[in-house]
Amino acid sequence: MTQAPSAASKRQRLPWWRPRRSRWAQYVALAVVTVTLVIGGLWLSRTYQRVIDYPERPGVGSAEPIALEVAKGASFPQVLTQLLEARVIPEDEGLYFKLFVLHRGAAGKITAGAHTFRGDMTPEQVLAELVRAQRTEETRVTIPEGRNILEVADILAVAGYGDASVILAAMRDPALLKELGIEGESVEGYLYPDTYKFPTAATPEQVIRRMVEQHRKVYDNLKRSHREALEELRKTLGWGDREIIIMASLVEKETAAKHERPLIAGVFLNRLRFQSFQPKRLETDPTIIYGCTAPVKKSAACEKFEGRIRRIHLRDPDNPYNTYTHEGLPPGPITNAGKSAFEAVLAPKKSRFLYFVSRNDKTHQFSKTIAEHEAAVEKYMRQGAVGDGSAAGAADPDAE
């Protein structure tokens, strides 16, 4: 009797071309992996080639010009959105272009201003246009020495930088003053008089920053060359930069004759330093005029100011800029001084003079005593001169 083959012997006798069931699963998995790797390799190869070719691949849009304005301070994502919306870059290539720009390290090099594109430009050409240096239109503006903020605002308004009232508001803006590190209620004294080339599209704030920057540049250079004088002013009067700027503005307004400025600065400093000179009033007319014209808030007497100082203005205690009724320096600069006025304060001419009065020829008569000064005032007032820097002042003595 023949014995039936066992299950084990059946498995052993399976033909070579019929693999075991467990190996079928392995072959299927291997086939899937192989196909996946082949397909993935092909995809990666095509993607890699597309990335390599991307910068030089022409766009699919038209050759018609597309004008775009990139705002100042716009971020790269904002610019990319503009390009996509204008169809300079196809929507499905936004990510490619972003990676391309980031790879080039050009995201922060995009220039603000007007740009012109076409839909058929290559990404390389689009990027080149985005980083193209803009031709800046400039306006030449001259700010003369001795102009206060009202006058500077008028000059800038005529040059096309906005309404004078808007420019003045910027000059008094607390936020801008804080940013610039300026004490007081305005940028008075910090707008360096010079000839500038401002961008035609600049804002009042940008123009102001430029002038303050120039002031600091010039003033810092002067400080480096007059260290001993700065230390002397600090020790004898307790002055810092603010006080020097105020004094320079007084010297600037007192005379246009540059050779006289060191002597006039010396007179003012004598009045403050000499113990025998009391009270320590500078008694200079330009401060009264400034207090009656430039500040937003004015005294009752200043509200009646019509361009000429009268006795009511000389005696006005409510005008903080009245150096006939208040001792020491006024609360702030009264104009924007030039380099020679600062040099006069830092290198004053030593003398014993305490008074001066105009000779009516753009120069001054200096005196050591009040008697000498009163005689000089009488002499030159008879000639129609306007007194300044003195107790006599420029007032009409018969006017109230």
Image (cartoon, rainbow, N blue to C red):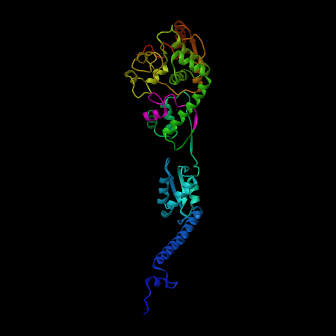
Depth check: 118 or 50 in front? 50
Residue 185, magenta (yes or no): yes
Quadrant in which the C terminus is drawn: top left
- Residue 318 visible, this angle: yes
Q: Is residue 101 above or below residue 335?
A: below
- Where residue 371 appears, as percent x and y from the top left, is 52, 6
- Where residue 127 appears, as percent x and y from the top left, is 57, 56
Residue 164, magenta (yes or no): no
Q: Main secondary structure of the magenta part?
A: loop
Seen from this angle, which residue lies furthest top? 371
Depth check: 59 or 257 in front? 59
- Where residue 206 appears, as percent x and y from the top left, is 51, 39
Instruction: Tally the numbered discs.
Output: 0
- Residue 387 visible, this angle: no
Q: Is residue 36 above or below residue 386?
A: below
Seen from this angle, which residue lies furthest left? 300
Q: Is residue 202 above or below residue 263?
A: below
Quadrant in which the N terminus is drawn: bottom left
The quadrant where residue 173 appears: top left
Q: Is residue 56 above or below residue 399?
A: below
Depth check: 110 or 292 in front? 110
The quadrant where residue 357 appears: top right
- Where residue 53 appears, as percent x and y from the top left, is 59, 64
First to last magenta residue range? 174-196
Depth check: 256 or 56 in front? 56
Seen from this angle, which residue lies furthest front? 1
